[in-house]
Image: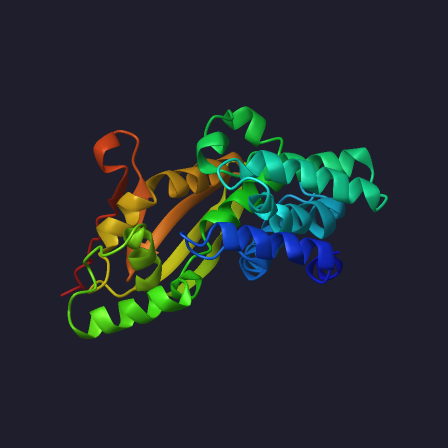
């Protein structure tokens, strides 16, 4: 399914146009879309292994990868409202290729609701009925590292880093570039609970290695609070918890402290027996 999308000339042209119109931001090209597909596929496999009745093969094989691939394609038509523009593109493309209205409609809905602010307006009850959307949103929000920074900005950040000046914001959207450039490794993990059930299936963990001479862990967490809050909401709707792990320290979303939404989890040590 995704293989045919990834080589379709019309779709690749749209992604190239959208990335060009988004050049003031980090990359939003077809490679980014495929990275989201890769993470979404991994999460779908984990969720479906626990709850096959909630995530049937059609969702795993078609709806989730298609939603992940199409999620940013609307930038070619309207960068600021690319979710709605992308919804129309996905719906029209899939219907023209013979997909049923049900399948095309679900993919289009994923594209329409993938932005954090829109996603966070959806109730937990509704999200629990739409795990395909939750998986794509978590994958999208968890894809981001130094490779997404555009070439000349990445070069500038390398030079500034060597001079000890990387934390300065010297151009528009420099903070977003710095934070992404500071992420040297990113991996999505799923911990299993051996006694998992619908209420507690395990933990989805975004594990990051960050160069804090470029951007601090606190800056990263603060800048992307809403993105990670969306991940938390999506994971909880499927029976998982969501955690950030930055340089070995885990963070959890804490609604009781809205000014510090993501808090480091305190560690403890066990004294060996005497």
Instruction: Kindly indicate the quadrant of the structure image that contains residue 15.
Output: bottom right
Q: Quadrant of the C terminus?
A: bottom left
- Return the residue nearer the eye: 188 or 198: 188
What residue do we see at 72% from left, 34% from top? 105
What residue do we see at 29% from left, 47% from top? 221
Residue 223 appears left or right of 274: right
Q: What colour scheme has been applied to the protein in the rendered image?
A: rainbow
- Return the residue nearer the eye: 73 or 122: 73
Q: In which quarter of the image is the N terminus?
A: bottom right
> In the rendered image of this protein, does residue 113 appear above or below residue 203?
above
- Return the residue nearer the eye: 202 or 43: 43
Q: Position of residue 162 (x, y in %)?
A: 20, 75
Q: Where is residue 259 in the image (x, y as percent from the top left)?
A: 22, 33
Count the labels in the image.
0
Instruction: Specify whether residue 53 is in view.
Output: no
Q: Where is residue 120 in the image (x, y as percent from the top left)?
A: 45, 30
> In the rendered image of this protein, does residue 103 appear above or below residue 146?
above
């Amino acid at each position: 399914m995704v293989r045919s999308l990834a080589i379709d000339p019309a779709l690749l042209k749209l992604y190239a146009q959208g990335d060009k119109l988004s050049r003031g931001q980090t990359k939003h090209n077809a490679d980014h879309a495929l990275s989201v597909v890769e993470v979404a596929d991994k999460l779908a496999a984990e969720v479906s292994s626990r709850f096959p009745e909630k995530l049937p093969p059609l969702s795993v094989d078609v709806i989730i990868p298609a939603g992940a691939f199409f999620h940013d394609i609307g930038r070619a038509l309207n960068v600021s409202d690319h979710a709605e523009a992308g919804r129309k593109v996905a719906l029209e493309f899939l219907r023209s290729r013979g997909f049923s209205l049900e399948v095309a409609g679900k993919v289009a809905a994923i594209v329409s609701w993938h932005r954090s602010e829109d996603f966070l307006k959806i109730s937990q009850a509704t999200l629990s009925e739409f795990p395909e959307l939750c998986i794509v949103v978590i994958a999208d929000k968890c894809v981001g590292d130094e490779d997404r920074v555009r070439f000349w900005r990445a070069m500038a950040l390398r030079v500034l880093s060597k001079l000890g000046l990387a934390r300065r914001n010297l151009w528009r959207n420099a903070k977003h570039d710095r934070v992404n450039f500071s992420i040297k490794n990113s991996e999505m993990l799923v911990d299993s609970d051996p006694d998992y059930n619908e209420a507690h299936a395990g933990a989805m963990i975004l594990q990051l290695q960050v160069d804090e001479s470029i951007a601090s862990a606190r800056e990263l967490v603060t800048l992307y609070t809403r993105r990670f809050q969306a991940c938390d909401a999506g994971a909880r709707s499927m029976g998982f918890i969501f955690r950030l792990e930055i340089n070995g320290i885990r963070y959890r979303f804490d609604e009781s402290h809205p000014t510090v939404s993501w808090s480091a989890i305190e560690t403890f040590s066990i004294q060996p027996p005497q």
